[in-house]
Every structure is written in C-alpha cells, then in structure tokens.
Amino acid sequence: MSGSGAAVEKAESRQRLQVNEYKENQNIDCVSLRPVQTTLLGKTAKVYLVPFSLSNLDQFKCSKSLIGKNSNNEVACKKYKTKIKKTCGRILTPKMKATSSNADSTLQKSSLDVHTESNKPQHSNSDAVIIGVDMESSQDGDSDEDTTPGLDDFSGLSPYERKRLKNISENANFFASLQLSESAARLREMIKKRQPPESKRKKPKKTTNEIGCRRSMRLLNVDPSGVSLPATPTQPSLVADDETQPLLPPGPLEMAPKNRDDNKELFKGFLETWTAMSKTSSKNTEKGLSSIKSYKGNLNGMVLSEDTVQKVTKGPVFSLAIHPSETRTLVAAGAKFGQVGLWDLTQKPKEDAVYVFQPHSQSVSCLYFSPANPAHILSLSYDGTLRCGDFSRGIFEEVCRNEGSSFSSFDFLAEDASTLIVAHWDGNMSLVDRRTPGTSYEKLINSSLTKIRTIHVHPVHRQYFITAGLRDIHIYDARRLNARGSQPLISLTEHTKSIASAYFSPLTGNRVVTTCADCKLRIFDSSCISSQIPLLTTIRHNTITGRWLTRFQAVWDPKQEDCFMIGSMAYPRRVEIFHETGKRVHSFLGGECLASVCSINTVHPTRYIMAGGNSSGKIHVFMSEKNC
C-alpha cells in the first residue's frame, strides 16, 4: 500500500509541475518544427513539433505523467500510446497528418543532433511542447514510409508554390482514384461492333442448268413446235407531241384523204355531192324564239344510236362544225394532230362515209363553215396557219400564215367572210382580208391580254368582238384598234381562275356565256355595251376535265337563243342544256352508246341535230328519228 501511495504522490507532483510550466509558457503559440528523438522505456520515440493551439494542452497531462513511469508498466504505456495517437488525430488537420508522416524519412538526418538534447532531464525548461508521440520499436521495425517529398525539398519555394504543388499532387491522386482510364477502356470495348456470328446454315451449291430459264414462245418468236416465225412488221406509232411535227409547205394543199388510198371515184362523187348541196342551200330566215315547252319536246325526240357514233380522227377532238344543209348531215371535226375529218351521216355504210385530211401539222382549235359559201370550210391551227377547204376545187387554200406565232381562234368580221379577226396565243390579234393577195395579215394588234383562248364577233354589231384571256374577258371595238396597244371597252373581272371560252348569243348578242375553271358558268347581259356589263346568273358546274380531256366550252343554240349546252363529268355520261336563268332544260343521255365525256359540242343552226366529240376522236350525233 505504501508503494502504491508513493507512486500516486509522484504522479501528482509531476502533474503540478506540468501545470506550472504551462502557465509559464502561455505566451508561446508555436514551437520549432525540428523533430526530437529520445528513448523512453527502452523504446525509441519520435516527437514532431508542429504549430498548435495551447488550449488542447490539458489533454496531455495524464499521458505525460504516465510516460515517466518505470519500464515494468509497458502495458499501460501501450494503452496510452493508442490514446495519444487518437488525440493527435483530432487536433491535427488531414494536411498536417500528411506532412508529419511524410516528413519522417526526411528528418532522420537531423535525429543525431537532437539525440544529445534528449539525454537532458525530461522536465527541462525548454520552449518546445510535445504535441505528438509515436512510439516505435526498433525491434519490430514497423516504420511508416511515404513517397511524398519531405519538407526540406520545399525549402527554396515560396508558400504559394508549395501550396500549388500540393494541389497538383492531390488532384492527380484524386483522378487516379477515379480510375477513368479503366472506365474508358471498358466503354471502348462495349461500343466495339460485334461481328455477326457466322450463320450455321450452309449455302446450297449452285447447280448449272443446261436448259436455262424458261422464256415465252411469243418473245422468242417461235411456234409451239419450235420453228422460228417470220419477223412481224412494226406498226407506225402515233406521234405523241404535235409540236414536234414539221410545218407543212406553204401554198395550197390537195384535198386527198389520208384514211383511204383506193376508190378515188367514190371520193370524187363525195366532193361533187357537197358542191351541189352548197349551191342550193339557202340562208336561214330568222325566226322568233319558240316556247321552252316546245323546245323541250323537240329535244326529247333526239336520240343516239350505234349508227350515229363513229371514230373520225385519231387524236382528241378540239373543234366541231355541222354543215348548215337542210337535206344532208355533214359533221366536220378538227383533231389534235392537225387532222380534219368529214363524216357524211347520210351515206351508208358509215365506214365509207368518213374522210380524213391533213391540212395542218398541229392542233386544229377552230373550225367553221363559211357563212357566205357553205362549200368552204375554214380551219385554224396552232402551227400559225389558217386554211380554207374548197370542196368544189378539192384543195386546202392557205389564207394566212405566220410561222413566228401560234394561232388560237378566229371569227368572221364581215358577213360575207371576206375579213377575219385572228387571235394569237401570245395575246396579239391579226386583221386578215381574204380579198388581198398573199397570206400575210393586214394589221397586227397588241392587246392588253397576255394570252387569248377564244375570240367571237357580235352577231349584230360586228364591230364589237369579245376575247377570253387567262383571267379576264375583254370586249374591243374593231374601229379603235391600235397596233401599239389597244385598250378594251369593257373588262369582265369576275372570274377567279383560268377561262376556257366566252361567246355572244348567236342571234341578238344580248347575252354572253363564259366557261371558267372555278366550276362556274356565268351569263352576262350584253344588250347595251357600255362601260359595265352586269352579271345575270352564275351556275355551278363541274368544269375540271383533267389533263387528258379537252376543256369544256359552253356554246349557244341558235334555235333557242336563251339556251346553251356544255359537256358534263357526271355519271352516266351526258351533255346538258341550261337556260340563261340557270335552270337545267335537258340532258342528252346515250346509254351504252355514250360511255365517254363529250368535251366539244355543236348544234345545227336550224335542225335538231347535236354533235359531241370526245378525246379519242369519236363523234356522237344526237338527232331526231325522222332525220335518221
């Protein structure tokens, strides 16, 4: 008991001594960084002196007193050694730990100088304060090693450079810990395209076929027995584009039918018959309008049969005309490829009554029988030529020729058909006098339109004529035409899309009917030609024919001036007649005989005969049974 009491007294005296030393050294904030090496209890202790706060000194009072015990109390020393390490870990920052551990190898050089100082009494009045003790046994050899350079390596650098090098080292270690290179290598392996596995299916070996592929005997041009057939002659193909045809030579052309080479005597009899009929035909006397009721009754008596349907031309029909004869029925058709076909419905059989001529090289857009001499038929074409077919002489005489321009339509300015007004596709107009020699025009007029589709002369006041342009309709006075530019008397601007045609009523000219691509038929009051022509009626009608059909054109019926007819896209196929008030008067239905759209239509001036042409060259003639 006395031994243990003496030990306690010694420990308390040492503790009081440490408190006195602490009070004496309160003004000391830091000590030298030089390490001090000493030997305690047979062990080698390394002490590192670093800056610290004196407020933490109380934690070492007990540990300092225990270090001075005898060597027999090694177990207690080991316990307090661990406690001292934990306490130093809380005081030192992570960077200070790294510095103290990394400086171990560097400060070994100065340990000999400090060893002499360690032999001095432990309770010396030195200015150094022990803040960390690392008990290390030289026999165990468990010394820490670090590759970080020591403090002596930074002795020549400024504090900023030291901090910068530490940051670089720490960043390098941080990125190395992320293992980015290994992750990138794994990603590269993942994105590599895997080669498709080889198909286990074995490809069949190609076997050589000595016979070869089967081919049609028709393509091989052999019969079923294997004997070669003679080569079939190639059929002449129809020209697809009429603009590629060369112009026909100027001057008169012989009226020679292209669809028949033999039996010229039959054709000669055809010409003589029509010459005689034209001489005896008299001009129709004007009659008053019949009632709508009687007009409907006559229309109901018009029928279509197989005998009145015939293919006349090879291409689409662009124009139609009916001879004004009272005894015979002759229909003329102008086609796309410059053909003019004549069909005599009185002659039987009907295959021998069709004659096709080639007076033009391009589309025949306008066709009229001469009002002065019905033995003459005038045709106008896109190729810039206007010709007159004379049945009495059997030739197509050239009336006007302009190779630099394309014609679109024409009409007679004089009742004797001596002067004509010709419309051009480029918007110009030509005055042609047939009484003057040559084939040139008398005057070329520049209109205010960019394009003219149709032109029509007023039936009473023949100095006025109407033109249908792209979007506008103009009425001109032939007495005020100027070669440099002519302004219209009246402009009709109610149309919203492309205009197909515009015509005066045939007897008085008091009405104008127009056909427009906006699916509307318009009737205007032209009884008084002034600055304004009022719009009377608008009729909804499908006028969209498409690319392969000829455009619709509404034309008046001379027998009933207040009614007009137009083709239809409705099913079953038909040709419709409307009154100027917009009411539908009649529909021509042909049943099985009318299976196509009749885009171009015309009527006989006095007889109840109506002819319609489609886009394949067929003519359909509706007529009363007594005329058949």
Image: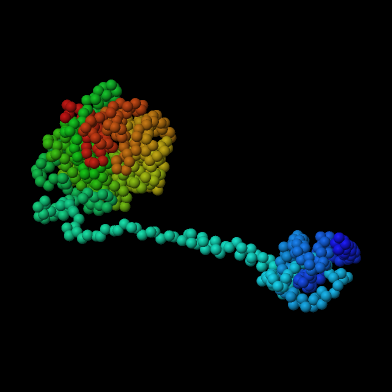
Q: Is residue 80 above or below residue 599?
A: below
* The N terminus lies in quadrant: bottom right
* The C terminus lies in quadrant: top left
3 or 537: nearer the viewer: 3
Q: Position of residue 514 (x, y in %)?
A: 35, 35
Q: Is residue 311 above or below residue 227?
A: above
Quadrant of the image occupied by residue 213: bottom left
Quadrant of the image occupied by residue 491: top left
**Marker count (numbered):** 0
Q: Position of residue 568 (x, y in %)?
A: 30, 34
Q: Residue sitting at 73 percent across and 69 percent down? A: 136
Q: Is residue 458 visible?
A: no
Q: Is residue 428 above or below residue 146?
A: above
Q: Residue sitting at 57 percent across and 62 percent down? A: 180
Q: Residue sitting at 26 percent across and 29 percent down? A: 588
Q: Position of residue 608 (x, y in %)?
A: 22, 28
Q: Position of residue 605 (x, y in %)?
A: 24, 31
Q: How is the image coloured?
A: rainbow
Q: Residue furthest front?
A: 1
Q: Is residue 220 visible?
A: yes
Q: Residue sitting at 12 percent across and 42 percent down? A: 267
282 or 298: nearer the viewer: 298
Q: Does 369 sit left or right of 186 as displayed?
A: left
349 or 514: nearer the viewer: 349
Quadrant of the image occupied by residue 340: top left
31 or 252: nearer the viewer: 31
